């Protein structure tokens, strides 16, 4: 089956512009300094869609933008990456902007403006695209307020009823804490997800546990219907599958320059590879390799280079030489 014949992955949620700022020195009140700055397409769901497409799986994106030049450029950027856009536009709100402040270790703090992506309504969803998708991905950024919560919940129900699998990225440990752990768990119970993609901070905020295996065990017990891919930054990833013991996948040794978007890149590469070849362990190895490449560059969607092409080609050759199932959970 060719890529064009497979039902797509559809990511729903935030499409915005990232303003990346990495100061050369500390930012002082009233002061000035130099640094590295970049403006690029962003948003957690949109980033994941780009990386799913980059690993070779047909991918679409559904979201809302303003009727402005930034919105038009964001859509063109998705199309250039091979992502099919299902976009709603509005003149009531501008396209979203996210500020990422990056420190000398490559770690980032994010400030997310509430742009048009926060106002997606259920009746604006691309019903046909949801009902013909192989897989639908949501992020918690579509859940912390309503709208767009109603749209996200409706999208998950539509897709699931049509036979799609669903994944969820819990999004932000700080937002989970502000929302309230019990309230967030109640919200998660309304989403028929088959795969959970938290990072360590998010898993800690949800589970109340502090050690990775304990966090994974709690999540697997609490959400028995779902598999878990726990992202552990420099420690790689920990897989909790339906059968067998947890599987640790080590991180690469890439030098960290900017961690922005690494979790989204892991998620997109994991889902895209998993849907292509049906092997969770191979998908996790591909995803950690992609995440390592991302943190060693500036920005969530650095231009594809020969290093990335080589990494992806190696994972594809291994997968094509194996006897993995052609589809996940068919």
Image (cartoon, rainbow, N blue to C red):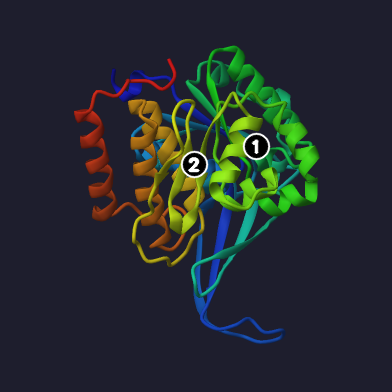
**Based on the displayed image, in which of its 4 quarters is residue 154 positioned?**
top right
Q: Which quadrant of the view contains residue 138?
A: top right
Residue at the spot 53% in from the left edge and 18% down from the top edge: 164
Front residue of 28/71: it is: 28
Q: Quadrant of the C terminus?
A: top left
Give the residue displayed 42% in from the left and 60% down from the top: 295
Q: Residue at x 22, y 29 (%)?
A: 320
In the rendered image, the vertical position of residue 305 relative to residue 1, given as above or below: below
Give SS at disc 1.
strand
Q: Position of residue 13 (x, y in %)?
A: 62, 38
The x, y position of residue 68, in whole percent, is: 63, 48
Q: Classify mark 1: residues with Cα within 10 Å, few (<14), some (14-19) or many (20+).
A: many
Q: Residue 228 vs residue 309: left or right?
A: right
The residue beneath circle 2 is 48
Q: Is residue 56 visible?
A: yes
Q: Position of residue 169 (x, y in %)?
A: 59, 40
Q: Nearer the viewer, residue 279 or 91?
A: 279
- Counting every numbered tag in the picture gives 2
Taking the view exactly as shown, the residue that stands out farthest to the bottom is 31
Q: Secondary structure at mark 2?
A: helix
For the residues marked 2 and 1, what is the alpha-carbon distance in whole angstroms? 21 Å
Instruction: Answer with mark 2 or mark 1, whichever residue precedes in sequence.
Output: 2
Q: Is residue 11 left or right of residue 30?
A: left
Q: Residue furthest top?
A: 162
For disc 1, the marked residue is 89
Which quadrant would the N terminus be assigned to in this image? Answer: top left
Q: Residues within 10 Å of mark 2 (few under 14, many from 20)?
A: many
Image vertical order of residue 324 relative to residue 55, above or below: above
**Image coords of residue 253 (percent x, y):** 34, 61
> Residue at point 56% right, 16% down?
131
Q: Nearer the viewer, mark 2 or mark 1?
A: 2
């Amino acid at each position: 089956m060719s890529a064009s014949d497979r039902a797509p992955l559809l990511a729903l949620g935030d499409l915005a512009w990232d303003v990346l700022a990495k100061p050369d020195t500390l930012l002082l009140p009233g002061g000035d300094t130099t640094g590295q700055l970049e403006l690029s397409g962003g948003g957690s769901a949109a980033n994941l869609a780009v990386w799913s497409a980059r690993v070779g799986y047909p991918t679409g994106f559904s979201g809302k933008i303003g009727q402005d030049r930034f919105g038009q450029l964001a859509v063109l950027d998705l199309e250039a990456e091979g992502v099919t856009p299902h976009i709603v536009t509005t003149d009531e709100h501008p396209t979203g902007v996210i500020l990422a402040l990056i420190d000398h270790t490559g770690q980032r703090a994010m400030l997310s403006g509430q742009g048009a992506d926060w106002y997606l309504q259920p009746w604006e969803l691309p019903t046909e695209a949801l009902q013909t998708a192989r897989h639908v991905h949501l992020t918690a950024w579509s859940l912390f307020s309503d709208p767009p919560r109603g749209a996200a919940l409706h999208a998950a129900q539509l897709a699931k009823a049509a036979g799609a699998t669903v994944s969820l990225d819990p999004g932000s440990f700080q937002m989970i804490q502000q929302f309230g752990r019990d309230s967030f768990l109640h919200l998660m119970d309304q989403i028929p997800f088959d795969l959970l993609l938290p990072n360590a901070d998010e898993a800690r905020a949800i589970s109340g546990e502090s050690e990775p295996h304990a966090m994974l065990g709690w999540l697997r017990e609490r959400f028995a219907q779902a598999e878990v891919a726990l992202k552990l930054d420099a420690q790689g990833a920990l897989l909790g599958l339906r059968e067998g013991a947890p599987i640790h996948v080590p991180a690469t040794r890439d030098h960290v320059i900017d961690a922005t978007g690494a979790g989204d890149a892991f998620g997109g590469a994991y889902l895209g590879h998993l849907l292509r070849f049906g092997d969770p362990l191979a998908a996790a190895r591909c995803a950690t390799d992609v995440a390592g490449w991302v943190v060693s560059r500036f920005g969530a969607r650095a231009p594809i280079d020969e290093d990335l092409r080589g990494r992806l080609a190696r994972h594809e050759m291994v997968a094509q030489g194996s006897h993995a199932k052609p589809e996940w959970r068919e």
